Image (cartoon, helix red, strand yellow):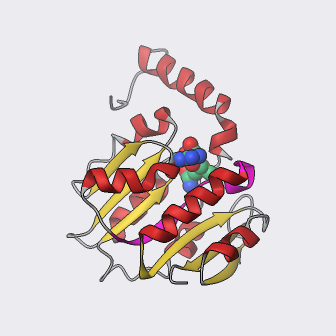
């Protein structure tokens, strides 16, 4: 169900309020309720060649700002598959109307099964906002493993984080891991650019 603009004190306002409470209750999976800054989003996406990329997977939709920017940059014939575990964000994403976008309400660890269901083999890039630092190590390992296995050899796994705590896990899984940093976000963030091939 898509959210619609509503009047103050209306049923829609009540709905948004209860959604916010649900969202805060899910803070352990969300990681943060602060929307990524345009600078962080540009930094995160800068290594993607949008002329050639045809299949991009997004892990964790949140407020949808990265989803929207991906769609703004993506080739008309490309597709974006966005996976989100929180149903509030999934519903909110229905407001983004773009035939290139497929949203799945699921855990990122199910990536391979979701791709199989969609008839998708390999993918060009994974763009992740997942809060890896507060997720269980087994789930992090699984998500990194299935992502790496789904990527083409030239593909990349792009991730931002607020600490370097997951650097070792990324370096174990990917052939090459470059780490950048931007102060232009609250809080400042590290950006990982991981090359898929081992
Ligand atoms: C840090 S927030 C993303 C914020 C987003 N970049 C923005 O600016 O709005 C992390 C997102 O990952 C989602 N998430 C957490 N664990 C997940 C999982 N296992 N599978 C899919 N999505 C997950 C959360 O529900 C949340 O939407």
Q: Quadrant of the C terminus?
A: bottom right
Q: Nearer the viewer, residue 163 or 189?
A: 163
Q: Residue at x 54, y 67 (%)?
A: 41
Where residue 11 sits in the image (x, y, percent)? 43, 14
The picture quadrant where one finds residue 152 is bottom left
Where residue 175 sits in the image (x, y, percent)? 60, 84
Q: Nearer the viewer, residue 56 or 149?
A: 149
Q: Which residues are magenta?
A: 122-136
Where residue 172 sits in the image (x, y, percent)? 68, 74
The picture quadrant where one finds residue 144 is bottom right
Please say if 135 is above or below 179.
above
Q: Residue at x 67, y 52 (%)?
A: 138
Asked if the magenta segment contains residue 129, the reply would be yes
Q: Residue at x 21, y 69 (%)?
A: 76
Asked if the magenta segment contains residue 23, the reply would be no
From the viewer's perspective, is 17 left or right of 70?
A: right
């Amino acid at each position: 169900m898509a959210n619609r603009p509503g009047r103050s004190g209306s049923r829609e306002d009540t709905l948004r309020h209860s959604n916010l409470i649900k969202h805060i209750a899910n803070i352990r999976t969300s990681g943060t309720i602060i929307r990524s800054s345009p600078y962080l989003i540009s930094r995160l996406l800068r290594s993607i060649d949008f002329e050639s990329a045809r299949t991009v997977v997004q892990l964790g939709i949140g407020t949808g700002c990265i989803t929207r920017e991906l769609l703004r940059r993506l080739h008309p014939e490309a597709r974006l598959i966005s996976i989100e575990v929180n149903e509030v964000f999934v519903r909110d994403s229905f407001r983004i109307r773009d035939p290139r976008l497929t949203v799945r309400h699921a855990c990122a660890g199910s990536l391979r099964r979701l791709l199989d269901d969609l008839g998708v083999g390999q993918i060009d890039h994974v763009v992740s906002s997942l809060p890896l630092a507060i997720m269980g190590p087994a789930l992090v390992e699984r998500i990194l493993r299935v992502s790496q296995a789904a990527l083409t050899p030239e593909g990349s796994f792009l991730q931002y984080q607020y600490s370097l705590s997951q650097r070792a896990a990324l370096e174990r899984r990917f052939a090459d891991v470059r780490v950048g940093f931007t102060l232009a976000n609250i809080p400042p963030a590290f950006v990982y650019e991981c090359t898929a091939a081992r």
